[in-house]
Amino acid sequence: MKRTRLFLLIALLAVCGTIEFTSCSSNKENVNELSNITKIADQVWTFSQSHPDGFTLDVRTMTEPTEGISVSYAATQGSHSRDQLDKVVRHALEHDGYVGGWYNSNDGLYYFDSSRVFPEDSLRSALRFGKDNLQYSAFILSTYTDIPIEGKVAEIVERGNICFGTTGDYRPLSFLEPSTGEYWGFGIEMAQSIADYLDVKVSFAPTSWPTLTADVMAEPQKFDLAIGGITITDARREIMDMSEGYLGNGKTILCRTEDATRFQSLADIDKPEVRVMVNPGGLNEKFANENLTHATIIVHPKNEEIPSLVAEGQADIMITEITEAPYYVQTDSRLAAPLLNSPFTHGEIGVLMQKGQEDLLQMVNNLIEKKKADGSLRQLHEKYGLVYSY
């Protein structure tokens, strides 16, 4: 009996010792954890001082991700200054490991959030997460694009489709192939790249040069934005929005090969006996009416038919663009573009859309800049035999 009691006493002391040891060990781990959080928070604070315009930081490695979609958690929203940074870091370490921060010049405070970074092909999930966490926007890291949780881009992503208006009569930028009913061209591939960037499907709606402005501004909208051979002009930008340019452009002519030496200037063309054919409602007709006051102007309804009509002798000149002329010279030996390297005007082609869709405009502009920077825009120019001017 005494031996049993002694055994029980020893066991009890051992248990108590273990509990005390475990408690001490746990307290030590807590102290170490708090010390580590404070150390990381100090590093984030130091980093923030040299990045006032904003950043997303992986606090596990202290590196900035260059791709992904950063969205903040509601749990840490409104946290600011150094004394509130520890709780943000703790939340980040317990969740996804990212902290976002920026300097607010209005109140002179640095704000911090625990963030989640989604893959860039998961914009729909990122926007839904942002909505659930009461956020204003999601931020695409690779293009520095803020996407509002409630906006035009979010509407497109939620529906899963982006619709482009296009004329389908402008080789090699936008052409509707009669035999297949499919669109092809430089502009069509640009449209597809925008859809791919948003991870949505792409569709196309017909428009025309005479009705382009009305179609873009229609309510309800006929399409989200327009693409093809649309030149950026001040007149268009006054009433609509246009993206930055992604293709250099300028007015030139197509004529029959045997007349190439005959037409070397506007003065050579602006004569009563010269028949100049243009499509209606666009900048080609406007240019002809303003600069060819003596030539005979013929308006033909279908732009894609004019090169053949010139080749067949039903007109002498087609007013066109340096983006369009090379295609017809390469595919029809009867045609020449003698002034291709000295266009009458210089401009750029861009994407056209309604005003009031600033998030969509910013997204398109940032994607164009990304494609210029990574070389993919140049590659697309080369594919279609177009001159790269950026």
Image (cartoon, helix red, strand yellow):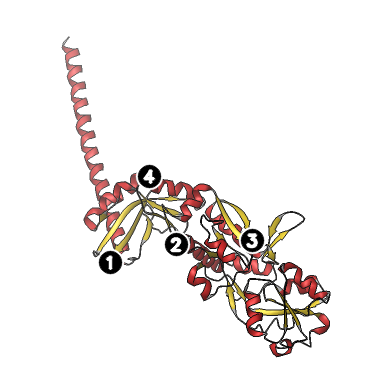
* Earlier sequence position, callout 2 versus callout 3: 3
User: Which residue is under mark 1?
Assistant: 105
Q: Nearer the viewer, mark 2 or mark 4?
A: 2
Real-space CA distance between mark 1 and mark 4, rounded to the nearest whole angstrom: 28 Å
> Percent x, y for residue 286?
62, 77
- Helix, strand or loop under label 4: helix
User: Which residue is under mark 3?
Assistant: 188
User: Which residue is under mark 4?
Assistant: 132
Horizontal relation, residue 231 to residue 5: left or right: right
Residue 368 seen from this side: yes
Real-space CA distance between mark 1 and mark 2, rounded to the nearest whole angstrom: 26 Å
Q: Nearer the viewer, mark 3 or mark 4?
A: 3
Identified at 61% across, 57% down, the residue is 192
* Earlier sequence position, callout 2 versus callout 4: 4
Q: Name which residue type carries label 1.
A: Ser
> Percent x, y for residue 54?
35, 62
- Helix, strand or loop under label 3: helix
Tell me if mark 2 has few (under 14), some (14-19) or many (20+) residues whose alpha carbon lies within 10 angstroms of its own: few
